[in-house]
Amino acid sequence: MDYPIWDFAMGGGMLMALVAVPHVIVAHFAVGGGLLIAVTETLGVRRNDPELRELAKRSSLVLILVSTVYGAISGVGIWVVAGLISPGAISSLIHNYVWGWAIEWVFFILEIVAALVYYGTWDKISKKAHMLVGWLYFVGAYGSLVVINGIITYQLTPGKWLESHAFWDGFFNPTYWPATLLRTGVALMMAAAFMLFPASKSREAGTRLVRYIGGWLVAGSLISYVGYRWWEAQLGETTRALFLGESPTLASLAATRSFTLWALAAALVLGIVFLLIVPRSIKAIVPGILVMVAAFAFFGGWERLREGSRKPFLIHSHLFSNGLLVEDIERINSAGLQAYTGWASTGGLDDPIEVGRRVFKIQCAACHTLGGYRSITEALPTFQEMLAVTANDPPGSGAAAFEAGCASCHRDSNFEEMVEFMPGADEMKEDPEMVTDLLVGMITGTLEQLRDMGQAYVDADRSVQFDTQTTAYPMMPPFVGNDEDLEALATFLGTLTHDGASTVLTGGGE
């Protein structure tokens, strides 16, 4: 929370997804493709099978173009975007795993150099030496995977690291081995998906080579399924409650889980049918595209599930999604945000709305935009929506309006209690500005609940993962700051309309 916020209309999370998902698909192809190409060339040489060796040669061009060009560029893009939207998390990853990153970069250099040498030395060096280069490429690529996997998985399941902050305790965390197995299976699936079309180009052995690629796809699908089930079983109860059970905490994440598993099933079935049973169908292009899309959808779905399962943290039980450290909650509540965050305390402090805008950026902008992705204004009622609740005309419409616009925040109230609390419809029409005060009052109450929620994190055992299901708002970080910060944020939010502009709430269309 001590870094300036980068405003982006799309929202940082969505931008990261657009950059990261294509990158990880390509990156896992770089790993699985390295293994598949190395094995294919080795088999081609040992069996004296020119078609297999030619497949390895054609696929190596795809590997160079996709992994070392797009993969390398998009990898840099991930660092840039992550550094802009989550500087606190990147700082933590670097400080805790600087030697891990250094090792990964050594593997990456080996991978890139070996890939370029491999492609550039076809039929120019001995077959034995060329195969050695291919296997060196795979060692570098897979080494990158196993190192990065340790750093990524600790963010969701830090395990003993929460108590010791030791490198190896975080690296070999509870989900490290399951995720390694899962990613290995995914790498095989990505390799098969990308190499399917080079295999289908062979006139003499196309059917045989497609079946050969199909075997890798099926094997990768089965390994991925085992890895996924193991990964899910290693998650803590509070994390699984987000997307499992009869009433998951986050319905959208439960839908993502269902989508992920169905996509994996589709990839497996399509692979068996089109690649093993009817391999000639790949000549029609569409079946191959369906296989590829299903494989990509499974991996993208799991990445979305993995990222979403960290809510409301970036590093579980240590660093919240807005950059707030659990250990800083008491200090910020006591001193206030302006004393803690230097960039937010310069100029414009006489205007409570401007102060509130800055507090919003610090506290909320990591997940919410004003009027775009995860719009905060969509969560705030308009004059017309509040009028619909209290007017209840025709009968029953008020309860429906309450369920649609109020129930998600006012979990401790029902429609009847809300109507008793609110002024009548005639009063609201006569004095629309009163609604602003009412809205600010309700927001203030919610923010006070969020600030009180922070004490649960302060009092919790810091050596184990926190059970967010025990809080009033398990998907949100607690509010931190003094009374002035809280009042400023409530005032700012109370003046937002649904177009995201800061104005005084009036009667709208009246």
Image: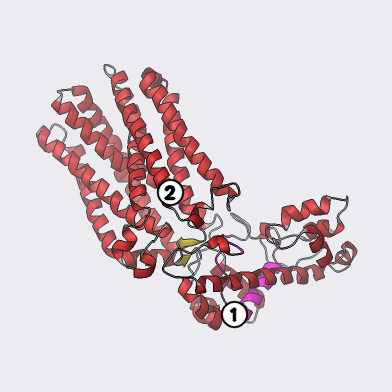
Q: Is residue 125 visible?
A: no
Q: Is residue 407 magenta?
A: no
User: Where in the figure is residue 465, as x and y percent of width and height?
Assistant: 45, 63
- The nearer-to-camera label among 1 and 2 is 2
Judge left or right: residue 430 versus residue 26: right
Residue 220: x %, y % from top left: 35, 35
Tell me the distance, in whole angstroms, between the alpha carbons under discs 1 and 2. Answer: 40 Å
Residue 482 - label: 1
**Height in image: 184 above or below 433?**
above
| Chain-order first, disc 1 or disc 2 | 2
Could you tell me which secondary element the residue under label 2 belongs to? helix
Circle on res. 11: none
Image point 45% across, 43% down: which residue? 300
What is the quadrant of residue 419 in the picture? Answer: bottom right
Mark 1: which amino acid? Asn
Which residue is pictured at 57% across the width and 65% down the height? Answer: 364
Decide if residue 423 is in sight here: yes
Q: Which residue is mark 2?
A: 233
What is the magenta range?
A: 472-497
Looking at the image, residue 199 lies above or below residue 171: above
**Residue 371 point in image, percent of width and height:** 63, 57
Label 1 SS: loop
